[in-house]
Amino acid sequence: MTNSVFSYLKIWVLFATLILFTYCGKKPVNQKYISPTETSNEIDADILLSQSSLDQAYHAVVWLEFEKLINRGILNKREENGYDLAKPISMLNHVLTLEGILISNLNNSIKYPIGEIEKTINLITLANNDLLRSSQLLNIDWYNYYLGDKPFKPGGMVKSELKDIIFITHLLGSGKNQRKTYSFLNDYFDTNRFLDVFFEEKTKIGDGKISYMLDIQYEIYSKSKFYAALEILTTAQLQAYEKSSWLHLMDFTQVSDKDTVLKVSRDSTIIGRLIHADRSVLEGRHFTSSSSLETWYLTNLREKPMDICIVVDTLKKLNTDYYTAHYDAFEDCDCWYDYTRYMIVNSLNLMAFQIIRHGEGWPIRDVASIDCLESLTDYYFEVTGEPMDFRYKKITPYFMAPYALLASENGSHQPFFLEYIAGQVSVSPFMSALHGMYSEYSMFSMGEN
């Protein structure tokens, strides 16, 4: 009896030791994942609102190229199906740009029905003057407020008209201070109304109507939200990887005062040193790192677009060679989870920005790259411990937004992207409009008319 009890106790000791060893072996990877929706009751409603505003601004800017891709695909398909407005709207997308009104891109040979397109072209022609004269011809009363000649009470309640969109395009292309311009737009206009529909056409079947949106509407909206977001970044409660994602986005959009917008306290942990080196690179200062992986992240990944499969393979070394080589450092700060997430999310952002900035290999269509991206999602969920859930507020936007941008041509992912976008329809006019566009685009890509 004593021997059997002793044997029984030995088995339990061994079992407990095994559990302890398993738990401690890679403790950070197994820590509980806290969903973005699992917030403390003590978090102020204003903080939650500001975080939502930051999410929406980040999405809108990162997905501008995504919107253009979808819009272009829809317009091409509608033109094939005989819709009269598709071709002139495509032309207007090359005339009204963030660089200003490119009057040389007006094609007078394009046939269009008399109505809104003709009105738009006439307005564009009137706007092809100096700003003061253009404001007078278009009857833009608010230009005097913008110049400071007349005082006004900021309220952000004015509904924009088509002539406002055209004049704002002219103003943005004039070289005026962008921050001042977008600050004024946020104070004067209801920026959500920049995404109002100005063009509609009767459907070929039935009595319905289809809507058309200009790319410049999305661009003005997203940049307005972006500059409004910069005003609240200093007080927002963001994690380290989120702050760095914003800094990389600001660098991509050429905002110069990154350091004054987002400051971070420096610490001597392994993740603290990486964050400091990251900021140093963004500010053009010297950095040091004894890690070849960190040096790759801080230099190679920022020089030019890189092969996606090479990026993914390099990141996967985090969970093998890198963790083992720096085990003591990660144990000291208990930051393996934070470090891994920081590296993956910001590498994905950098990769997306490089591809868009240089226009090489965008959109991504080759099967090998898509497969590598898909394996990156599996790896991300594996090492972070997050549930594999692509719904908004279940997965961080700082991973999902650049990932969806890069993998947009992956047909098997379209249902996931639609679900993610649909979750934001009620809180974001940009996503509401994009959801309708992407739903139509998805049907086209599946061979439906």
Image (cartoon, grey):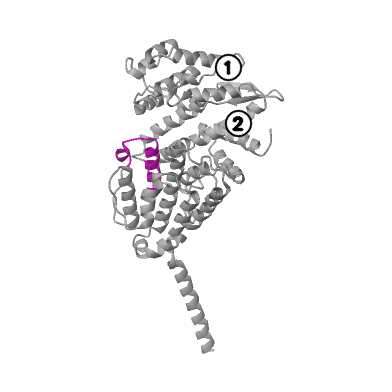
Examine the rendering and report whether any part of residue 218 can be seen: yes
**Spot occupied by residue 239 in the image (x, y as percentages of width and height):** 39, 48
For the point 37% across and 61% down, which residue is it?
A: 330
**Spot occupied by residue 211 in the image (x, y as percentages of width and height):** 60, 25
Q: Is residue 247 magenta?
A: yes
User: Which one is in front, 151 or 280?
Assistant: 280
Residue under label 2, please give it: 74
Q: Residues within 10 Å of mark 1 (few under 14, many from 20)?
A: few
Query: Residues under labels 1 and 2: Cα distance?
Result: 22 Å
- Of the two numbered discs 1 and 2 in the rendering, the one whose residue sits closer to the viewer: 1
Disc assigned to residue 109: 1
User: Which one is in front, 192 or 47?
Assistant: 192
For the point 37% across and 60% down, which residue is it?
A: 334
To which quarter of the image does residue 185 belong?
top left
To which quarter of the image does residue 351 belong?
top left
Examine the rendering and report whether any part of residue 40 can be seen: no
Q: Residues within 10 Å of mark 2 (few under 14, many from 20)?
A: many
- First in residue order: circle 1 vs circle 2: 2
For the point 39% across and 55% down, which residue is it?
A: 339
Q: Is residue 52 magenta?
A: no
User: Disc 1 vs disc 2: Cβ atoms closer than 8 Å?
Assistant: no
- Inspect the image, locate mark 1, and give the three-letter code of the amino acid beneath it: Ser
For the point 66% across and 39% down, which residue is it?
A: 446
Q: Secondary structure at mark 1?
A: loop
Q: Is residue 403 above or below residue 226?
A: below
From which residue to which does the magenta span run? 236-262
User: Which one is in front, 248 or 43?
Assistant: 248
